[in-house]
Amino acid sequence: MKKTTRATKNKILEISSPKGMRDLKDEEYYCFQGFFEKAQEVAVYYGFKPIETPMLEHKEIFTGSIGKGTDIVDKEMYTLKTKGGDYLALRPEHTAPLMRAYIEHGMQAMPQPVMFYQYGPAFRHDKPQRGRYRQFWQFDLDCLGIMDALVIKTGMSILEEAGANNLTIDINSIGDKECRNAYLKELTGYYRKRLNDLPPVDRERLKTNPLRILDSKEEKTKEINEGAPDSVSYLCASCKKHFREVLEYLEEMNIAYNINKNLVRGLSYYTRTVFEIIEQKGSEDGTPLTLAGGGRYDYLARQIGNKRDVPSVGISIGVDRIIASPWYKKLSPRILKKPKIYFIQLGSEAKLKSLNIIEILRKAHIPIAQSLSKDSIGSQLSVAEKLAIPYVIIFGVKEAIDNSVIVRDMSSRSQETVKLSKLLEYLKELK
């Protein structure tokens, strides 16, 4: 048996994608593109405008906003030091970069609220598992103003257009700077009484960010959390009023919701409303699947250096999970057109002149399929038939000399020779 050398192993590693990352190609690529097009379309109808932020940001944008005690900052960020000595990070989420752009470009002077959508990859050094990757795709909606229900409704509309039909909302309010401290004091006391039962990871969180324990994935902690005090009971009058209004909007729009007292989300910048959109039968085994989540982040602007708070709310949709779901409609992107003509080129002289014919077809907005292989005309006609393409254009040596093509009707098997100068006019009659 041949021994595998270290050099051989290294060579294998060099030609594989990094762990938790993958190539998007063929049908999967079009599924992603189709979803993003539909999501943009829905967002525009609700009044959102596009923005795109860099994949790399200064590290402090995230460490100062997401917060210590979160898995993202503590162990999941991809960071690097540039030759100029700057510390940068691949974005683990889109919200902090959006707020940075809002401040940097003086958007406070624009008519408020300012509403944006953005999409693209984000990066977290998380443990890869089914439906979760280290490079993953998100579609985000953000409203820099006080419109929680609008953001939730827009997110749900996008998911419904993609094929989800059993959506519910898990929602909670975690208060603001006026009332959260009282809740945190009570919550911390609750966990300290059960300190010996907490797993090590949650004991550490108790020192840095007790609220994060409510979001723990540890089974023992989940049991403890069932008896934890709920944040809604500690809301100040202003937060209670705000939360009540959000729920009233949801009821008015007939959106089913469940008040989840343990819902805090994974980022420290959230305040007041936090929520998740769940497909109740979303997984392959019919179990609930969280597709999107978000909340208010009224203090984020100040956390990253602004002089005042900017009331804001946003939602992030996990696109990878949607594309992998059995209910996804496989939305086709507009760029993907079903070919109406199969273009057969035979011989080197014909191939040389073929681009002129393709240009005629493109200007006429006629999508084509083609083969540049050396297969016989019979095998190429067979491919056209399998693809159910209605017409075939045959361009061989004789046609190249005569400046003509043969147009074959695949349903009737009839064909006609057409001069290139008359081709566009002839094809219009076929439509």
Image (spheres, rainbow, N blue to C red):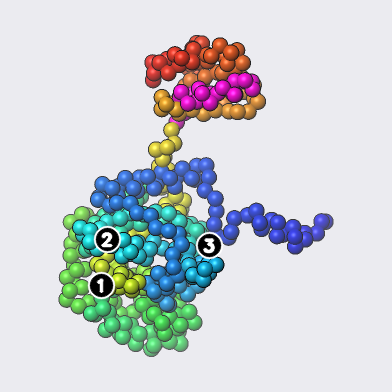
- Work out whether 161 lies above or below 295: above
Image position, residue 227 (x, y; %):
34, 79
Question: Which label was assigned to residue 209?
Answer: none
Reading the image, the residue beneath label 3 is: 128
The quadrant of the rendering that contains the N terminus is bottom right
Estimate the spatial distance between the alpha carbons at disc 3 and disc 1, rounded to whole Å. 38 Å
The residue at the point 26 percent across, 47 percent down is 45
Reading the image, the residue beneath label 1 is: 308
Query: Foreground mark, 3 or 1?
Result: 1
Helix, strand or loop at mark 3 = loop
Reading the image, the residue beneath label 2 is: 107
Residue interval drawn in magenta: 338-361
Q: Is-magenta flag for residue 158?
A: no
| Residue contact at pointers 2 and 3, CB within 8 angstroms | no
**Circle 3: is it few (<14), some (14-19), or many (20+) Cα within 10 Å?**
some
The quadrant of the rendering that contains the C terminus is top left
Q: Amino acid at mark 1?
A: Arg
Helix, strand or loop at mark 1 = loop
Residue 191 falls left or right of residue 134: left
Query: Foreground mark, 2 or 3?
Result: 2
Helix, strand or loop at mark 2 = helix
- Work out whether 401 lies above or below 320: above
| Residue contact at pointers 2 and 1, CB within 8 angstroms | no
The residue at the point 43 percent across, 45 percent down is 33
The residue lying furthest to the front in this view is: 84
Estimate the spatial distance between the alpha carbons at disc 2 and disc 1, rounded to whole Å. 13 Å
